[in-house]
Each structure stands twice: as C-alpha cells, then as structure tokens.
Amino acid sequence: MTLPADPDQDAVALRSAMVKGLAEAECCANPAWLTAAGVVPRHAFVPGFYLPTVVPEAQDLTVWQPVTPGLDYGRWLASTYSDATLITQLCGEETDWTSPKARRGGVPTSRFTLPSLIMRTWSDAEIHEGHTVLEIGTGTGYSTALACELLGSSHVTTIEIDSARLERAARALRACGYAPTIAQADGLYGYWPEAWFDRVVSACSFRVVPHVLIRQVRPAGKLLVPLSGWLHGGARVLLTVAEDGTAEGPLLPGGISCMPSRTESAAALGNLADWTAGLADASRPARHTHHRLTDPTDEASHLRFLAQCVVPEAQMAFIDGLPHLVDVVSGSVASLTPEGDSWKVREGGPLALWTRIEQLIESFDAAGRPGPETFTLRVEGTAQSLLHPQMPELRLPVPY
C-alpha cells in the first residue's frame, strides 16, 4: 500500500539538510536566520516552477518544463529545498499550476531565489531583533516568512508590484500563520503608510538608489539595494542614512543575481541592422576588446556596473555576430570587429561610447583592478557618487 504524500512530514529531513548546507557554506553571518530557515516550510510557498530542458528540435529556444507535486512529487520537494534558483514566472504571465504546460522559449520574470542568497541578503542588512523592515519584492513570500519568524509579523512590511504574485504569497503566508503588512506597490516609491523603517531591503535591482527609499529610513537606519543597469552589470550597496538625509555605504563583495525592477527594464533597440548605418566609415585600433565586459567572471560583471556610470543608456548587442554598443537615448553606436590578432572599433553619434569604456578600463587597471568592496557610494540630494581612492569619481546618472 502506498501512503499519500505528506510534504510537511517529508520536508523535515530536507529542510534540516538545507540549513546544514547553508551553515557549512557560511553564507549567513547571523545564525538567527538559519534558525528561522529551520522552521519556515519552504515548500508551502512553491506550488510549482519551471526547469530548463535541452531539446534538440527546439530551434535554440529553451524548453521550460513545469514541475509540480502532481507531476513529480519527489523532484518538486527535493528541488524546493536545494540551493538553486527556480523559475516561477515567464514573460510576466501567471501559470495555472493545477494544469501547467511546457513552454517553448520565454524570459523569466520571477523566481524562487536560492536560499543562500536570501540568507546572505537578510544577514548583510544587519537586521536585529526589534527592527522594523520594509521588504521590496515579496515574490513567493518565503523570504517574508523568514523575516516574520525572526522579527514578528508586526515588524515586517512587504510590497510587490505584481498583484497575482502578491495574492498567492499572501495566501501562503496566512496559511503558515504569518501576518505582515502586505501591499501592492512599486518598489521605486517604497511604502509611506508604514514608514519610518529601521531597514529597507530590496529583492529587485534598480539603476540608481531610489531617493524616496532613503527618506523612508530612520536616521542611522540602513538600506540594502541591488543596483544594475542596461549592460547587466550588478552590485549591492548597504547605505547608512544620516540625520541630514544623506546616505553613504560600501558596495558589498560577491556576485549577485537579481531581477530588475519592472519599471526600469531596458529599452527596446528596434531593428538592430539599422544601427550599423550610423557608424563612421573610419576605424581605429581598439585599446580593449569587449571580452573585458562579456567574460563570465565576477570582475567582468563589476566592470559592466562601473561602465554603466559612463555610458548609462548603452546596451550590448550582437549584430551579425559582432559586438555593438547601442544607446537609444543619444542615438550613439559603437562596433568592434576582429582584424587578424587585434580588433578595430568604429563609433557613431554624439557619444564616443567605446572610447568612454576604454578610458574607464584604463583607470580601473591603473588602480589595480579593485573589487566592489573597495568602493563607497554616497547619496546627497539627487547626486549619487561612486568613490574610490585611486579612481576618478563616477556618477550614477539619474535615469530618464
């Protein structure tokens, strides 16, 4: 006789193993978060998710296979308690997890963040008992539940822009006995009805630190925000807010992977072939190639983040297999072309995009290729300055 599945019981050993693995990975400086993770039933927040599958006849499109308790109970439960990112939404469209279908192609727009990153985020925000917290990006509600478990529901406010996501998360939180303040709101503007907060922690990234969030933090409070831009370079900053409303703090070490704020998504480039018409006929030798930005390394991601300060509206696009920088705001474009063992660059439009990148790379190299943790971000009024003792000041431009 086969007994019916009981995830609450079956998850006990998996949850214990997950917490042990997180402790061994030393992803969390505050062990109180690990204690909370040992209590919160992670599976209660995941009705289903997609996993990518390699299918030769898919014409290079990713085939996303749904995984639910009904389709594959063991895989669903084991994956839920693994340290892996699980895609829960594609192209902003909600899935009926009672009868999901495989998807051919599609861009992930929401995910069940890997637990080590959640632990690291909450711990890095330096949250302690008695603090009030605003979480930006409720998602599935699992990270919200951890905050409620540690601080108490009355100390937690969580906001989410996606109404369907929020409703599902609210049901899961209530079912688990948690009752934080929950609201549908755009993280760019925070949530004034519950301000002031001791901590504001964002699960999504912004192009610059939203100034209104700083105004919602108590003096001496902290704000942890992931930053990213249209070159897909990322950083995390932990700002401390002063009495006069200025804020300053370090970039945090290590790579990140956060969904961008939906209202700050990269602009559409249009017909890529049209951009090549704006290139100058003359070319020059490239002092640096695109590999410094595109290599799959933490340093390349860090460099892309810095580059976003000098070419904030530029995007990397490959046209006929060759790398181009395209700026839809200024109408500028740059291309890189291999020539023997070297590369040539052509630029067009009012901004010399690749020249700016090269100048940044050269100052970065001259400073000894410093890591993120050696930079400080200072926010004063509308100005946001990235400071390093051996590099010129970089400004995070206010998006248009």
Image: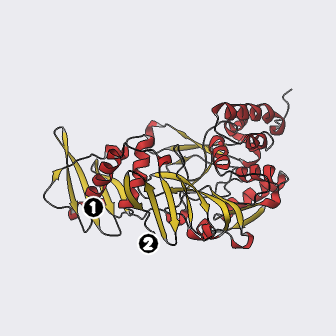
Residue 241 spot, x, y in % from top left: 62, 63
Residue 96 spot, x, y in % from top left: 68, 54
- Residue 262 visible in the shown view: yes
Residue marked by disc 1: 333
**Circles 1, 2 touching at the beta carbon (< 8 Å):** no
Type of amino acid at the residue the image marks with label 1: Val
First of labels 1, 2 by sequence position:
1
Kindly state the secondary structure of the residue where label 1 is placed.
strand
Type of amino acid at the residue the image marks with label 2: Tyr
Residue found at x 42% / y 52%: 389
Residue 96 lies left or right of residue 234; in this view the side is right
Residue found at x 35% / y 64%: 270
Which sits in the foreground, 171 or 287?
A: 287
Identify the residue at the far left of this view.
282
In this rendering, the answer to whether 258 lies above or below 194 is above
Residue 6 lies left or right of residue 17; in this view the side is right
Residue 160 lies in quadrant:
bottom right
Residue 248 spot, x, y in % from top left: 55, 60
Identify the residue at the far top of this view.
1
Which sits in the foreground, 303 or 42?
A: 303
Residue 136 lies in quadrant:
bottom right
Residue marked by disc 2: 400
Q: How dense is the environment of label 1, judged by Cα within 10 Å: few (below 14), some, or many (20 and up)? A: many
Residue found at x 32% / y 53%: 360
Residue found at x 73% / y 57%: 168
